[in-house]
Amino acid sequence: MIDIIEFPANADGNALQAIHSDHLAITCMQLKPGQCIPLHEHDNDSKLVVLEGKLQLKLSNEIRMVESGMSVFIPANTPHQANTTDGCQVATIFYSRY
């Protein structure tokens, strides 16, 4: 079964859409200029893809600039955070552990 969830924009104007199945989740997030995703980690491997704009990604202790069309693999349980100065659209694919 596949669930499609659309979350209304939060107070900062960021919007999120998510598609979930038993073994895969895909999120698409629109970040407004100056927004930050705080330090966090996931139990699953994931792949982050910048669809539009630029995202500064801190992955463990390394900082990278990820631009439109680029992607980054994030291993499970790896602390990461992200910032955008100009706004961006990001898709993240989460792989479930069987």
Image: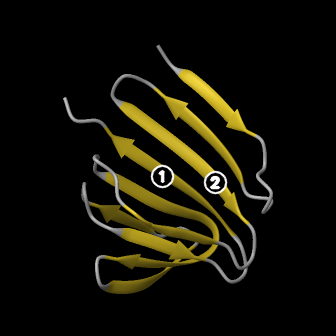
- Look at the numbered discs 1 and 2 and tell me whether their residues touch, using CB distance below 8 Å: yes
Against 93, is 38 above or below?
A: below
Mark 1 → mark 2, Cα distance in angstroms: 8 Å
Q: Residue at x 36, y 22 (%)?
A: 22
Q: Quadrant of residue 18?
A: top right
Please identify the quadrant where the C terminus is shown: top left
Towards the viewer: 14 or 23: 14
Please provide percent x and percent y for residue 85: 68, 83
Nearer-N-terminus badge (1/2) = 2
- Left or right of 14 on screen, residue 70: left
Please provide percent x and percent y for residue 48: 44, 60
How many residues crowd mark 1 within 10 Å: few (<14), some (14–19), many (20+)? many
Q: Which residue is mark 2?
A: 29
Please provide percent x and percent y for residue 7: 71, 39
Against 30, is 86 above or below?
A: below
Towards the viewer: 9 or 52: 9
Q: Quadrant of residue 40?
A: bottom left
Furthest residue toward left: 98
Q: Residue at x 54, y 53 (%)?
A: 91
Q: Quadrant of residue 80?
A: bottom left
Q: Residue at x 48, y 52 (%)?
A: 92
Question: What mark, if any, has residue 48 been given in the picture?
Answer: none
Give the residue type that dot 1 points to.
Thr
Against 65, is 90 above or below?
A: above
What secondary structure is found at the residue carrying circle 2?
A: strand
Q: Which residue is mark 1?
A: 92
Give the residue type that dot 2 points to.
Met
Q: Residue at x 78, y 63 (%)?
A: 12
What secondary structure is found at the residue carrying circle 1?
A: strand
- Left or right of 3 on screen, residue 34: right
Q: How many marks?
A: 2
